[in-house]
Image: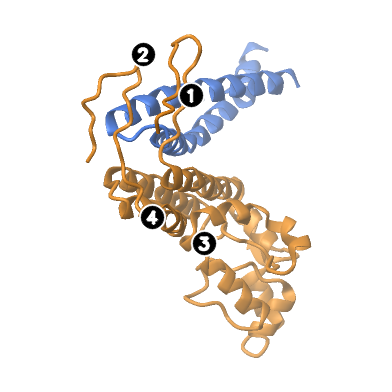
Chain colours: A blue, B orange
Amino acid sequence: MGDAMLPTLLHVIAFPLAELGNRLWYALPLLVSVSLVYAATRHEELPPILNHAWRFALWIALFMGGVAGVVQLITWAL
Amino acid sequence: MADTKDPPTAAGVPPLPEMDLRDPRLATFLAWLVPGFGHLYQGRTGKGLLFMICILGTFAYGLHIGGGRVVYASTVNPVGQFSKFRERWVYACQLGIGLPVLPALIQTWRVEHGKEPLLGDNFLRPPYTRSDAETLFGESMTQAERDKRFFSTKDQDDNLVYHKSEYQKWHHDLAFRYELGTAYTLMAGLLNVLAICDARWGPFVAPPTKETGDKPDDSK
């Protein structure tokens, strides 16, 4: 039974996660762009823009990661 | 002109350098027309280039992901027909980027008036309905040829699948990349709205909080 469970678990859990992981890379350029543009509307010089952009990108990444985690948990529960 | 040697404020935020926004209305228009142009006109070269690269890059990447189809992929012209605008409401957001999306209006107008779109098949043209295809290519193609070219795709088993409209075919062929490309181009338009506000009024600075004890400078 254990031998049969492993492929099933891989199919149900690992493959969707890998697919999700690949698609999540599409968020990276948008994350960089949004954080840089937003920060540039708050400052005039490059160093404070980059500093603000880094903190804002981190905040967005954490927020998106949290939402993705919740969605993944809901998916498993279903 | 820029003076960055002022000491930081009590909040730890360096003061903004003095800047000349020149003619803010013209800068606003230029910033809408091409992202970054308003700032370049104002002599804010660094920010202008940053906005241009980020916003146009986002837009171009979205257009690439979406196979060049995601800007104004509507079968109706919203000008004068706002009740139908809901079919492709995201164009209102994409319009924030200005010149790069304006050709879509011309392409739609041409298709609606029975003329072939300009500059090839892939340049911001609207999806054809069956009547559009018949009007445009009725003489040069048979119905079977039109159906095969504009409304059919091959499924996983290599069978020919026919769609009701080209809009549905694009959705089917591009799958999640259609929505992703739409989101990218939409975000590019909205980001340029922020850049336009920056060109019009300068950088947004949050008012001082009670904790820092700063007071707004009333002398300006």
Decide which of tag 4 and tag 1 comes sooner along the chain.
4
Asked whether disc 1 touches disc 3, contact meaning CB atoms under 8 Å apart, the reply is: no
Tell me the distance, in whole angstroms, between the alpha carbons under discs 3 and 4: 25 Å
Horizontally, residue A45 falls left or right of residue A17, namely left
Disc 2: host chain: B
Q: For this view, does B163 lie left or right of residue B212? A: right
Task: Same chain for labels 1 and 3? Say yes or no.
Answer: yes
Q: Secondary structure at mark 4?
A: loop
Work out which residue is located at the far bottom of the displayed protein and give it: B139
Q: Please state which amino acid type lies under the numbered disc 3.
A: Val
| Residue A21 placement (x, y as % from top left) | 51, 29
- Disc 1, SS: loop
Q: Residue furthest front?
A: B219
Residue A33 horizontal/vertical position (percent): 42, 39
Identify which residue, B24 or B119, lies in the foreground.
B24
Residue highlighted by disc 1: B207
